[in-house]
Image: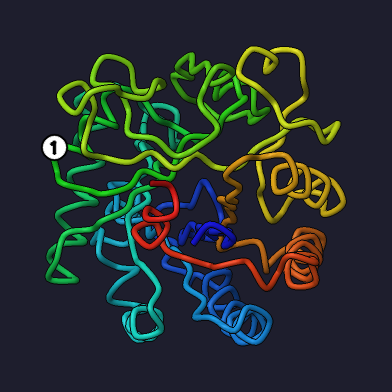
């Protein structure tokens, strides 16, 4: 496996709008389009790599979905046929909990990071998934880049294998520029590791050493780099403008950073993210299509292996 490069594409399956109106039961057109698009992408990438191509789909099954649709399982019941086809293709379905809470006094959604609410959001997502799929989820990616010692502990407690949330290089949720109500916890990921690891039980941003000091859970960070194209070392992170490999971002920068990561890392891999609503927006859809075209045409494309979270783990040992 030494010459092969694992690539994870992690797709957040969620409503087309972030702040969905109460009672708005509109279908998730973005997911429908994303499903159709990645079906064609799979065929192309399999031809290029001469290997099976698998994606990770992280589905919203949390209290916001329950409040809007009357059932947190609505995405599964609405799109069971699509999700079944994805599973039959070898893809992994997981959970994507958000911590949105409806506040009547301001008539808006608010991201709430109270530990009891965070646990409630995760537990609802986990139990809904288990009921609908007759098995526990194996992968999780929390919404809005939120990861903490608590969320890592929850994932381990509930028996998940992989976390796909961590975005190294960013300092706070509030820093991302959204004007939405929320408690905006301070999350400093400038020193976060940029390779897959099993976290220390004392500090989830550090790798555990001996077996008794590390968790069973794997953290597979989203790939990120400086917009200069440099591969960032943890000590350099505060001095650089950082961008994660998000398919909706500017395609030339996506290519610049991905090429740097592939060319300069001793054990290269890419973990790429995208929201399911991207195909509903022309500019972002174009960036996504261009970046995936660049990957398919990369001179090392024959070495790429598009894998699920679990399939990626043997590459890191």
Residue 301: % across, % down: 70, 69
Quarter assignment of residue 229: top right
Q: Residue at the spot x=33%, y=41% of the render?
A: 218
Nearer-the-camera pick, 78 or 163: 163
Image-based side of 98 in relation to 240, left or right = left
For mark 1, does the 10 Å Cα neighbourhood hold few (<14), some (14 to 19), or many (20 or more) residues? few
Quarter assignment of residue 82: bottom left
Q: Give above or below for 47 relative to 144.
A: below
* Extreme residue toward the front, this view: 2
Secondary structure beneath disc 1?
A: helix
Residue 2: % across, % down: 53, 57
Name the residue beneath numbered marker 1.
Answer: 157
Nearer-the-camera pick, 104 or 12: 12
Q: Give above or below for 97 relative to 71.
A: above
Residue 285: % across, % down: 75, 65
Q: Give above or below for 284 relative to 173.
A: below
Q: How is the image coloured?
A: rainbow
């Amino acid at each position: 496996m030494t010459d092969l490069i694992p690539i994870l594409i992690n797709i957040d399956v969620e409503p087309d709008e972030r702040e969905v109106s109460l009672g708005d039961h509109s279908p998730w057109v973005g997911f429908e389009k994303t499903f159709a698009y990645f079906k064609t992408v799979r065929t192309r990438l399999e031809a290029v790599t001469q290997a099976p191509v698998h994606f990770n789909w992280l589905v919203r099954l949390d209290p916001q979905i329950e409040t809007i649709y009357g059932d947190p399982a609505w995405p599964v019941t609405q799109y069971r046929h699509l999700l079944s086809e994805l599973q039959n293709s070898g893809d992994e379905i997981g959970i994507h909990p958000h911590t949105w809470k409806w506040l009547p006094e301001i008539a808006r959604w608010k991201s709430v990071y109270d530990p009891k609410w965070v646990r409630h959001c995760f537990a609802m997502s986990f139990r809904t998934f288990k009921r609908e799929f007759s098995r526990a989820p194996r992968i999780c990616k929390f919404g809005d880049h939120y990861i903490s010692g608590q969320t890592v502990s929850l994932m381990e407690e509930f028996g998940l294998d992989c976390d796909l949330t961590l975005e190294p290089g960013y300092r706070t949720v509030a820093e991302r520029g959204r004007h939405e109500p929320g408690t905006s916890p301070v999350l400093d990921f400038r020193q976060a590791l940029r390779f897959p690891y099993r976290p220390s039980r004392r500090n989830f941003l550090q790798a555990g050493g001996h077996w008794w000091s590390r968790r069973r859970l794997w953290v597979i960070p989203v790939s990120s780099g400086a917009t200069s194209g440099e591969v960032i070392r943890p000590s350099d992170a505060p001095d650089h403008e950082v961008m994660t490999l998000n398919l909706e971002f500017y395609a030339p920068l996506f290519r610049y950073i991905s090429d740097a990561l592939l060319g300069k890392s001793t054990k290269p891999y890419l973990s790429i993210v995208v929201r399911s609503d991207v195909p509903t927006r022309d500019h972002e859809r174009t960036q996504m299509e261009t970046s995936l075209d660049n990957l398919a045409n990369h001179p090392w494309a024959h070495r790429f292996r598009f894998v699920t979270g679990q399939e990626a783990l043997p590459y890191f040992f």
